[in-house]
Amino acid sequence: MKKSILMALAFLFGIFVSASFAVDVNMFGPKQYVRTKGAPNVYTDTFSALPKEGRLGIKNGEEDGKHR
């Protein structure tokens, strides 16, 4: 019984420790790309990141909802 409780506590501690290291790190930007008149604009950029799972966030338009 004590062994199973100890194993459960170790498991929960492992989940807590791994979750505490999940932080957002900005690897690129912010950068603004402006749409001009005429043909569609094409922008290409590169950035370095660690070879792990990540998240890419793109905001389209202004904070107040204009220019979307």
Image: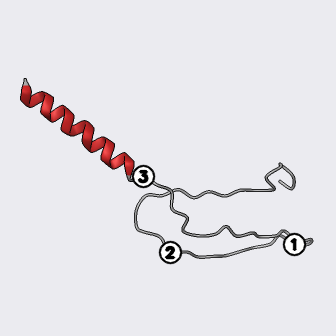
Report the Cα–Cα distance between label 1 and label 2: 30 Å
Farthest residue in the right direction?
A: 37
Q: Looking at this view, is 3 or 61 the one in front?
A: 3
- Number of numbered tags placed on the structure image: 3
Q: Are marks 1 and 2 in contact (CB under 8 Å)?
A: no
Q: Residue at x 70, y 70 (%)?
A: 31
Q: Residue at x 48, y 58 (%)?
A: 54
Q: Earlier in the sequence, mark 2 or mark 3?
A: 3
According to the image, what is the colour scheme of the structure?
A: secondary structure
Rendered location of residue 7, percent (x, y): 14, 35
Dot 2 amino acid type: Ser
Task: Using the rendered view, name the quadrant where residue 30 is placed.
Answer: bottom right
Q: Are marks 3 and 1 in contact (CB under 8 Å)?
A: no
The disc placed on residue 22 is 3
Q: Looking at this view, is 13 or 50 the one in front?
A: 13
Tell which tag, 2 or 3, sits nearer the viewer. 3
Q: Looking at this view, is 59 or 19 the one in front?
A: 19
Dot 1 amino acid type: Ala
Image height of 36 relative to 66, above or below: below
Q: Residue at x 91, y 72 (%)?
A: 38
* Residue where numbered disc 2 is placed: 48
Position of residue 33 in the picture relative to residue 1 (left or right): right
Task: Using the rendered view, name the quadrant where residue 58 is placed.
Answer: bottom right
Q: Residues within 10 Å of mark 2 (few under 14, many from 20)?
A: few
Dot 3 amino acid type: Ala
Q: Secondary structure at mark 3?
A: loop
Rendered location of residue 6, percent (x, y): 13, 33
Tell which tag, 3 or 1, sits nearer the viewer. 3
Rendered location of residue 64, percent (x, y): 83, 49
Q: Earlier in the sequence, mark 1 or mark 2?
A: 1
Tell which tag, 1 or 2, sits nearer the viewer. 2
